[in-house]
Image: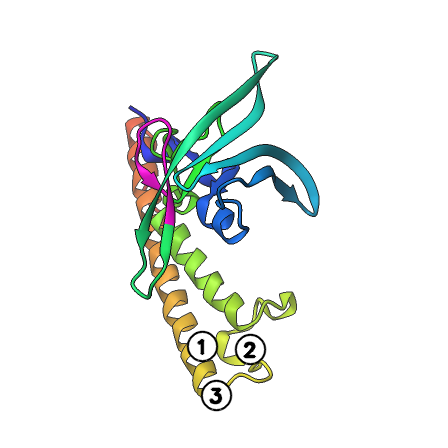
Amino acid sequence: MSSDKEKDATEDYRALDVRELHRAGVLVPGWLGNWQWKRRGAVVATIGIEAENRDRVRLRYQVTVWGEREAKDYPVPITWTPCHLGGERPWFLCPCCGRRVAKLYAHRIFACRHCLRLNYRSQQQSKSDRCWSRFWAARNSLNRDEDLKLLPARHIPKPKGMHWKTYDKKVAKIERLELSACRSSMVFIQKVERQLGKALALLGADVSPEG
């Protein structure tokens, strides 16, 4: 069985999000039309969707299998759950396993990430990578200016309109995340050095420091 890091990531697949369909009015019984995926404003993929009733939509599209075009036409069940503040939230029931999910991913048949053995890209990152990702996300929330990338957080100018209290909280968070990321990177480097030392020792190499 493959480990999590050997799985494809959900970000590598086109996703059909039932919440987006709901907001766009696609789930209204009788709705019939196309749903598109775009990249930089250009349409890269299209499928046909028909809302047969409140609890089922039908997907129609074509896939290429071994160089041959294959037409797909099948229903996908939908279930609804009440929201705490009123109203209802829709969910897909995966056509393959019946699991209740918000997203289905494009394959020969749209299926949930569990059936397609997908994980999230963040799950494929090392602990050090995740620490640095959180650090840069926090830093970018304060200022995305490339010219300020090398400045310590405290030297980043406060964005216009931001309260000083909010600015101080963001800076403190960035500094905590940076310290955590640096520590995590050091642990990773020390681990690699130990593994390299063991590997060289097995090869009969002298790995003791000079001087």
**CB within 8 Å, label 2 to label 1:** yes
58 sits to left or right of 177? right
Sequence order check, earlier mark of 2 and 1 = 2
Tell me if residue 40 can be seen: yes
Q: Whole-Å distance between the Cαs marked 1 and 3?
A: 10 Å
| Residue at 49% across, 40% down | 16
Mark 3: which secondary structure?
A: helix
Where residue 86 sits in the image (x, y, percent)? Answer: 33, 63
* Badge 3 amino acid: Trp
To which quarter of the image does residue 207 belong? Answer: top left
Tell me if residue 210 can be seen: no
Sequence order check, earlier mark of 3 and 2 = 2
Identify residue for label 2.
156
Identify residue for label 1.
171
Q: Whole-Å distance between the Cαs marked 2 and 1?
A: 9 Å
Mark 1: which secondary structure?
A: helix
Q: Nearer the viewer, residue 186 or 44?
A: 44
| Mark 1 or 3: the one toward you | 3
Where residue 9 sits in the image (x, y, percent)? Answer: 44, 37
166 sits to left or right of 83? right
Sequence order check, earlier mark of 1 and 3 = 3
* Badge 2 amino acid: Ile
| Mark 3 or 2: the one toward you | 3
Where residue 53 sits in the image (x, y, percent)? Answer: 44, 38
* Badge 1 amino acid: Val
Q: Read off the magenta span.
A: 90-101
| Residue at 51% across, 53% down | 23
Q: Is residue 191 magenta?
A: no
Identify residue for label 3.
164
